[in-house]
Amino acid sequence: MATVLDAGEIGRALKRIAHEINEHNHGIENVVLLGIPTRGAFLGNRIATFLGEIAGSVPVGTLDITLHRDDLRLRPPRPLLPTNIPTSGIEGKDVVLVDDVLFSGRTIRAALDALGEIGRPRSVQLAVLVDRGHRELPIRADYVGKNIPTSASESVRVHLSEIDGEDSVEILAGA
Amino acid sequence: MDKHLLSINDLSADEAIQILNTASELSKISDGPMKKLPTLRGRTVVNLFFEDSTRTRISFESAAKRLSADVINFSAKDSSVSKGESLKDTAQTLQAMGADAVVIRHGASGAAQRLADSGWISASVINAGDGTHEHPTQALLDAYTIRSKFPDLKSDFSGLKVAIVGDILHSRVARSNVLLLTKLGAKVTLIAPPTLIPVGVVDWNVDVSYDFDSAVKDVDVLMMLRVQSERMADSFFPSEREYSRGYGLDIARLNSLKESAIVMHPGPMNRGLEISAESADSHKSVVLAQVSNGVLIRMAVLYQLLGGAAFTGEVSA
């Protein structure tokens, strides 16, 4: 087990992502943040807080992708997680999806499908805390906290204080 | 959760709450223009109805379709059942067609259990009402409706006072509701003439009253039941008029309820018999909310049963 990001580094990475979102979209007037539960939702809130300090408040919500997964039949039924779309909606907005780890890209594919059910954003961007590679779909992130090269057998664990009591990112060796 | 949903007893309190929570997440997704979710694409749900039904069948059909499942409706009247085909042959036909779930309504108590235990089919069986036994999805949608009107309840219904009034004896809705509501901690009182109270009620963990007026003063939820004339071979009360006087919800009784109380009815209503038209249409009535919540609950149940890895059951001939 190796810690690759500590609390301070996570905080700085998220703050940098907030700056990049502000810069890339020429301000935040049209930006909506949607975190993918569980941990992406907390990261979305944190980025929204940083954006609030930098540029002003942005609508932030959550988007559950469970019903759109392509691997539902491989595992027992999963509980649904909260979906909260901000009242301003996503129609014509620049939506930034927020997740903790980008791996195969399948979660993001499902999120794009889930988003399509809700409305038609002007653009969809992706922010992740960790990009660990091994994509199985043509998907990439616009904002990356840290690129962490991994082997496919390793696993990446993101801990956040809201749910795990501390902030850290670890790599665990595979079996 | 089990492979089948035959009785409320198949669910723990946690599993029941899980279904209610799934339904409330689904309600957020389906707000506004109704979306079709891809979750059960390629799965087949058969509605096998040996008894008449409007809302339950339509509700299951629309729940399955919103999750993109294929739906086959089968009603006994216009099928080979009317030519004398047995439940076994019907079931095996459905098996051969590749049904993933069978929603069954049948006039005989235990029919759903029989289908599930028979080994005739590998599909999940959902009981949509069997005789005078149980109707679990109705109890779940009632609990969901109650929770949406009393948001403080969350996963524990203790402190909630529920009165179930009318034809308890013939009511599968009452039986499932008693099981679920007491499991969740609510206090349930049954109100009916002695002839319409089942014998085994002492084991149900409920209070029983024969006097409507004194029993309903402080209830939060008043659940009226349909008088099931079609199941009544004997006379259980002298006349409809007398029943209505003693156990019908008229405007005077409605007005004696607490301000926050709600009135439920599983439908179809006999207006003028167990419930007056004014009561049925009053602002305390949540009858239509029960119908729309039914779709969400049935989506949640179908998701729980079919949304995950397929069960691999052995099918015997």
Image (spheres, helix red, strand yellow):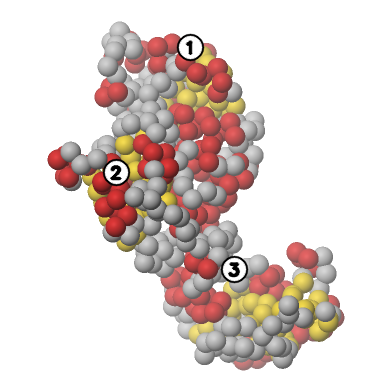
Q: CA distance from mark 3 to mark 2?
A: 47 Å
- Residue at position x 43%, y 42% in the image: B117
Q: Looking at the image, which is closer to me, B142 or B177? A: B177
Q: CA distance from mark 3 to mark 1?
A: 50 Å
For the residues carrying marks 1 and 2, which lies nearer the camera in this image? 2
- Residue at position x 42%, y 39% in the image: B113
The residue that label 2 is drawn on is B88
Where on the picture, by quarter, is residue B237? top left
- Residue at position x 27%, y 37% in the image: B51
In the image, taking residue B257 as reference, residue A160 lies left or right, namely right
Is residue A71 at all visible to an observer of this figure? yes
* Marker disc for residue A25: none
Residue A135 higher or lower than B288, as above or below = below
Q: Looking at the image, which is closer to me, B219 or B302? A: B302
From the top left corner, tell me how far across and down residue B67 is, in percent. 40, 61
Circle count:
3
**Marks 3 & 1 on one chain:** no
Q: Amino acid at mark 2?
A: Lys
Q: Amino acid at mark 3?
A: Thr
The residue that label 1 is drawn on is B211
Task: Say which element carries label 1.
Answer: loop
Circle 3/circle 2 CB separation < 8 Å? no
Q: Residue furthest front?
A: B317
Q: CA distance from mark 1 to mark 2?
A: 45 Å
Dot 1 falls on which chain? B
* Marker disc for residue A62: 3
